[in-house]
Amino acid sequence: MSEILCKIHREISYIEDSNNSFHTLDLYLPPQSKYRNNTNEEITTTTTNLPSLLVWIHGGAWRTGDKKEHALTAEKLSKLGNIAVAVINYRLNPQTFTPDGIKHPAHIRDVASALKFLSKKGDAFNYNSEKIYVLGHSAGAFMTGQLVFCPEYIDDEVYARIRGVIGTEGIYDIPRLLTIWPTYIDFIEAAFGKDEKVYKDASPQYRSLKRFNDEHVKKRTPPPYLIIYSYEDGLVDFEQSRNYHQHICDEGGVYVEIETNLLGKHDEILETEALHKRIIEFISKFE
C-alpha cells in the first residue's frame, strides 16, 4: 500500500502585493479524505471537524533560517497529529549591525502578519482557523512570547484564536542572555540595534499585560503554554526557560508546562521523534 501524503501548498504570500520571498509560508495539510476525532475514529470531513493549525516560527538568531529547512518535520507533525502545519518565513536582518537594514520590530511584525493572514484563510485551505497553535524555536520562541505579551502586534480577534503556545530552546530575556553569553552581542545588535532599552522592552520576560491601560489588553490571559528545554543545549541556558515559566504563571497563565526530559542539542532536538510526540501530546489536550 502506498503511503498517504500530505497536501502541500508552497510559497503562499501572506502580505498582499508583496513579492518578497520572506513574506511567504508553506502549508502542510493531513490527508484530506478523512480526519480523526479525539477517540482516534476516522470521520468524514465537515466544517466542524477540520484540522487545527500549528504555526511554526523558525529560529536562526533573527538573521538566518528558512521554512524549507523544516519541511520534513512539518510533514511528520501534520501526519502524526492530523493537523495543518504552516511554516512561515519572515524578513531577516543583516549578519552585522546596519543602521538602515532590517531590524526589530520587522521580524515580529511579519510573523504577526502571517498569523493574521492564516486566521482568515481556514475556509480557503480547509483547516480550522478558530484553533491555532503557535510553535517557536530559539529566536522563534522569543517571537511566540512577543505575540502573547506584546499586544501592539496582534489584535484581540487573532489573540482569541490562539489555543496554545510552544517554545523550545527559547530566548525570552535578552539582557540576561548577554550577561551569560556576552559574545552574543554581535547578533543581538544586528537584530535590535545598539539601544539597551530596546533589548529589555522587546523581551517577553519583561512585558506585562496587567500593566497596560487598555482594558481589552488587561482582559487577555496567556493561552496554554508548553516550554521545552533540553539540558544538552549548549547555546541557551536553562534559566531563560525557568524564569519565563514563572513569568507566565505570574501573569495569570492557567496552564503552563515546562518540559526538561527531552534530549538533543539546540537545533538537533527539532528532528527527534520524542519532541514531535510531545508537541502533539500538548495540542491534543486542548482539542
Image (spheres, rainbow, N blue to C red):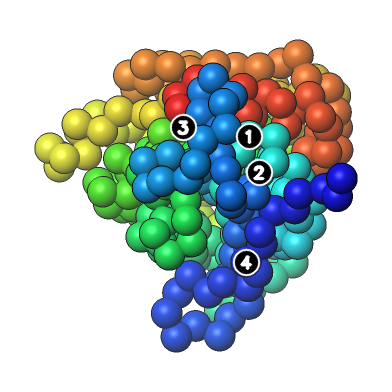
Q: Helix, strand or loop at disc 4?
A: strand
Badge nearest the viewer, 1 or 3:
1
Q: Helix, strand or loop at disc 1?
A: helix
**Callout 4 amino acid:** His
Residue under pointer 1: 81
Residue under pointer 4: 9
Q: Which label number is shown at residue 107?
A: none
Q: Residue at x 45, y 85 (%)?
A: 17
Mark 1 touches mark 2? (CB < 8 Å) = yes
Crowding around mark 3 (Cα neighbors within 10 Å: few <14, some 14 to 19, many 20+) is: many
Residue under pointer 3: 164
**Can you say whether 53 is above or below 42 in the image?**
below
Position of residue 163 in the picture relative to residue 240 (left or right): left
In the rendered image, is residue 74 in sight?
yes
Mark 3 touches mark 4? (CB < 8 Å) = no
Q: Helix, strand or loop at disc 2?
A: helix
Residue under pointer 2: 78
Badge nearest the viewer, 3 or 4:
4
Mark 1 touches mark 3? (CB < 8 Å) = no
Q: CA separation, marks 4 and 1?
A: 18 Å
Q: CA separation, marks 3 and 4?
A: 24 Å
Q: Quadrant of the N terminus?
A: top right
**Can you say whether 140 is above or below 259 in the image?**
below
Q: CA separation, marks 2 and 4?
A: 13 Å
**Callout 3 amino acid:** Gly
Q: Residue at x 78, y 20 (%)?
A: 262
Task: First in sequence, mark 3 or 4: give its number.
Answer: 4
Task: First in sequence, mark 1 or 3: give its number.
Answer: 1
Mark 2 touches mark 4? (CB < 8 Å) = no
Q: Residue at x 72, y 67 (%)?
A: 96
**Can you say whether 238 is above or below 12 in the image?**
above
Q: Helix, strand or loop at disc 3?
A: strand
